[in-house]
Amino acid sequence: MRWREEIDELHRFFEAYFLGTESSIERAEAVFAPEFSFVGASGTESDRDNTLQMIRDGHAHTSNLTITTSDHRLVLQTADVIVATYIEHHQLSEGINHRLSTVVFVPDPTAPNGLLWKHVHETWIT
């Protein structure tokens, strides 16, 4: 299971999708577990369907965006779950923002990198 690669690959997809150089949302659909939940940096919570709709709504919304991740840290790994943290960086024309993210993965041999995203919680870093 390649948790760090999964984090980086999904964020490269987000960057391409929001820039409009990627038009299919299949990458996100393939890795969000059916019971996926997301808590955004502003505290809003959404389920899988709402999160996918937010991603769809953001397609090609900018022409200037770079998304990177750093400070990857494994918090817990068992046969049934992986919990990790990382810092997500968004460079936009109007500036840069950072968020500390925690992800809960569950193994799935059919998913890219063998993992499904079960839960994500982001917090703004100021």
Image: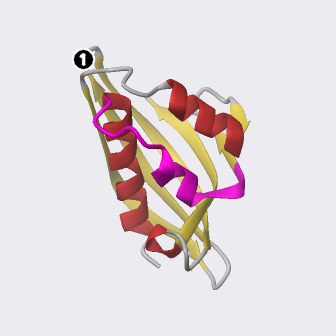
Residue identified by numbered label 1: 93
Q: Residue furthest top?
A: 94
Check residue 28 for magenta coloring: yes
The amino acid on which the numbered mark 1 sits, given as a three-letter code, is Ser
The quarter of the picture where residue 43 lies is top right
The quarter of the picture where residue 54 lies is top right
Task: Determine crowd level at label 1: few under 14, some 14-19, many 20+ residues with C-alpha closer than 10 A.
Answer: few
106 or 97: nearer the eye?
106
Q: Is residue 103 left or right of residue 27?
A: right
The x and y percentages for residue 34 are 72, 57
Q: Residue furthest bottom?
A: 79
103 or 61: nearer the eye?
61
Which residue corresponds to the image point at 49% horizontal and 50% vertical from the top-left? Answer: 26
35 or 21: nearer the eye?
21
The x and y percentages for residue 102 are 56, 53
Protein image colouring:
secondary structure
Which residue corresponds to the image point at 53% horizontal and 70% vertical from the top-left? Answer: 111
Q: Is residue 48 left or right of residue 83?
A: right
The x and y percentages for residue 95 are 28, 19
Q: Secondary structure at mark 1?
A: loop
Which residue corresponds to the image point at 68% horizontal and 34% vertical from the top-left? Answer: 50
Q: Is residue 74 left or right of residue 108?
A: left
Q: Quadrant of the C terminus?
A: top left
How many tags in the picture? 1
The correct choice, above or below, for 56 with respect to 112 in the image is above
9 or 88: nearer the eye?
9
For the magenta stretch, what is the residue range?
A: 20-36
The x and y percentages for residue 63 are 25, 21
